């Protein structure tokens, strides 16, 4: 792994840095403006990025990207993090849905769906988890039955982030219950704008309703919206999950570094840098941040070599979530009561971090993946 930038990469970074210096989003709406206002603000920001060709530089030019290399894409996330600009409103579409379609989608699906993902015209959500199928996704019960040229879907999804704004759902459903459970799944693009799909918000400890329950009662999906072929849903879903861990992991490690820098600045202001207990924790978190940064770069190098992110992304996601929780807890020790007062940025960070070790794969499950698929250890034997 060579971390020295080529001339082309340096030029890419300088162009983006200059653009960001001239194009900052307007101030974030206040927390009491509500979640719809926050979403609209991030959607406007994504449109602005899109018009300048900066919404997803790694995407091919024909779909609105810049055909950037993996390294340029990493530079992109670092610079966006450095400029402290928000994530695009359609992060799930850009980082998960689009890349999945690029691998498994038909030409028609790519032409139809990729441009509106990038322009934020159509927001995407991820309908994988169910009340009795989270980590064990292959146990899902939502059923799709063929009816002429359409599939009829009935079931329930849960924890569906952003479903209240989504036009399309990446939905995994069971299409065959006679075969082993992994083989009977199919990956669909479900139009959320139909009466058969009801979205009910679930309020989190932070007070916001970022995710939802989906109740699906005979929703209709045309055959043309099957992604990757009937019965191939497991493989297609793995592509989505690997992109989730690798792509989001890289973006998030930059935010983690900033959070830690803010904690260090706060500790300095309060004269706590000489306190051995605080200094010791800061040193450990600094080492972790650097380890995660280098692992994220290594993951990108592997993705460049093999064309797709590999299971190593699970390691970044696991370390990031654990370290982010520790950093927000240290912030509470350093900042004091303000970090525990509802409505403050620090209390939000502290509470939102609790979900980090669950979303995108729990820590326990990621450890199993790292043990088995990265380290080649024997498969876990679960006691009866
Ligand atoms: C903020 C947030 C946003 C989310 N957004 C989405 C979304 O947009 N779309 C979506 O589909 N899902 C989403 N999820 C759901 C998330 O993917 C699931 O919560 C996660 O996969 C865990 O599933 P579960 O909640 O059913 O827990 P379970 O799978 O029931 O796990 C319960 C406990 O058992 C442990 N466990 C389970 N299996 C094993 C094993 N084999 N070995 C060791 N331990 C094990 C787990 O680690 C956990 O501690 C979101 C979750 C959160 C917190």
Image (cartoon, rainbow, N blue to C red):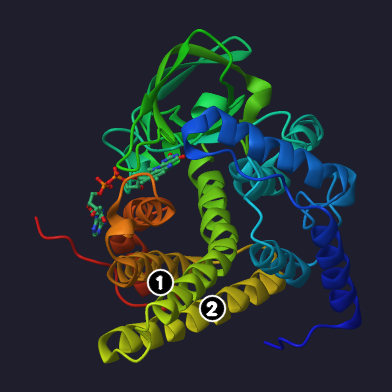
Asked if marks 1 and 2 touch (Cβ < 8 Å), the reply is yes
In this view, the residue in front, 198 or 348, is: 348
Rendered view: 323 above or below 348: below
Residue located at (81% from left, 52% from top): 23
Q: Position of residue 311 (x, y in %)?
A: 49, 66
Secondary structure of residue under mark 1? helix
Residue located at (68% from left, 23% from top): 224
Residue located at (67% from left, 76% from top): 301
Q: Position of residue 111 (x, y in %)?
A: 82, 34
In which quarter of the view is residue 160 placed? top left
**Ligand 1 within 8 Å, label 1 CB:** no
Rendered view: 379 above or below 187: below
Q: Quadrant of the N terminus?
A: bottom right
Residue 259 falls left or right of residue 271: right
In this view, the residue in front, 162 or 136, is: 162
Secondary structure of residue under mark 2? helix
Q: Position of residue 102 (x, y in %)?
A: 72, 47
Can residue 180 be seen here? The reply is no
Residue 76 falls left or right of residue 299: right
Q: Residues within 10 Å of mark 1 (few under 14, many from 20)?
A: many
Q: Quadrant of the C terminus?
A: bottom left
In which quarter of the view is residue 281 placed? bottom left
Q: Residues within 10 Å of mark 2 (few under 14, many from 20)?
A: many
| Numbered label attached to residue 295 | 2
The residue that mark 1 highlights is: 319
Rendered view: 151 above or below 118: above
Residue 358 falls left or right of residue 210: left
In this view, the residue in front, 245 or 81, is: 81
Can residue 366 be seen here? The reply is yes
Residue located at (80% from left, 42% from top): 48
């Amino acid at each position: 792994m060579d971390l020295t930038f080529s001339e082309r990469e340096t030029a890419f970074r300088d162009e983006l840095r200059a653009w960001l210096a001239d194009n900052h989003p307007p101030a974030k709406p206040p927390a009491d403006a509500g979640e719809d206002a926050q979403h609209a603000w991030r959607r406007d920001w994504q449109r602005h990025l899109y018009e300048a060709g900066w919404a997803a530089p790694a995407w091919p030019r024909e779909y609105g990207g810049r055909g950037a290399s993996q390294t340029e894409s990493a530079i992109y996330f670092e610079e966006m993090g450095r400029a402290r600009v928000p994530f695009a409103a359609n992060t799930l579409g850009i980082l998960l849905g689009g890349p999945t379609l690029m691998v498994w989608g038909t030409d028609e699906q790519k032409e139809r769906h990729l441009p509106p993902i990038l322009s934020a015209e159509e927001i995407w959500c991820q309908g994988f988890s169910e009340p009795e199928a989270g980590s064990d996704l292959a146990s899902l019960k939502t059923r799709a039955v063929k009816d002429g040229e359409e599939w009829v879907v009935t079931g329930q999804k849960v924890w569906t982030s952003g479903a209240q704004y989504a036009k399309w759902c990446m939905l995994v459903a069971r299409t065959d219950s006679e075969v082993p459970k992994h083989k009977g799944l199919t990956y669909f693009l479900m139009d959320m704008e139909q009466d058969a799909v009801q979205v009910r918000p679930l309020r989190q400890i932070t007070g916001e309703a970022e995710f939802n329950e989906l109740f699906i009662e005979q929703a209709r999906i045309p055959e043309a919206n099957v992604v990757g072929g009937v019965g191939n849903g497991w493989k297609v879903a793995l592509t989505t999950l690997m992109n989730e861990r690798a792509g989001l992991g890289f973006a998030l490690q930059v935010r983690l570094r900033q959070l830690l820098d803010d904690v260090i600045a706060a500790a300095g202001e309060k004269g706590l840098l000489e306190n051995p207990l605080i200094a010791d924790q800061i040193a450990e978190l600094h080492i972790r941040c650097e380890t995660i940064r280098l692992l994220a770069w290594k993951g990108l190098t592997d993705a460049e070599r093999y064309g797709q992110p590999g299971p190593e992304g699970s390691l970044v996601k696991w370390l990031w979530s654990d370290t982010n929780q520790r950093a927000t807890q240290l912030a509470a020790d350093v900042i004091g009561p303000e970090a525990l007062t509802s409505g403050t940025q620090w209390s939000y960070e502290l509470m939102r971090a609790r979900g980090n070790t669950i979303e995108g794969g729990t820590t326990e499950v990621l450890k199993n993946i790292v043990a088995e698929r990265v380290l080649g250890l024997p498969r876990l034997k679960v006691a009866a």
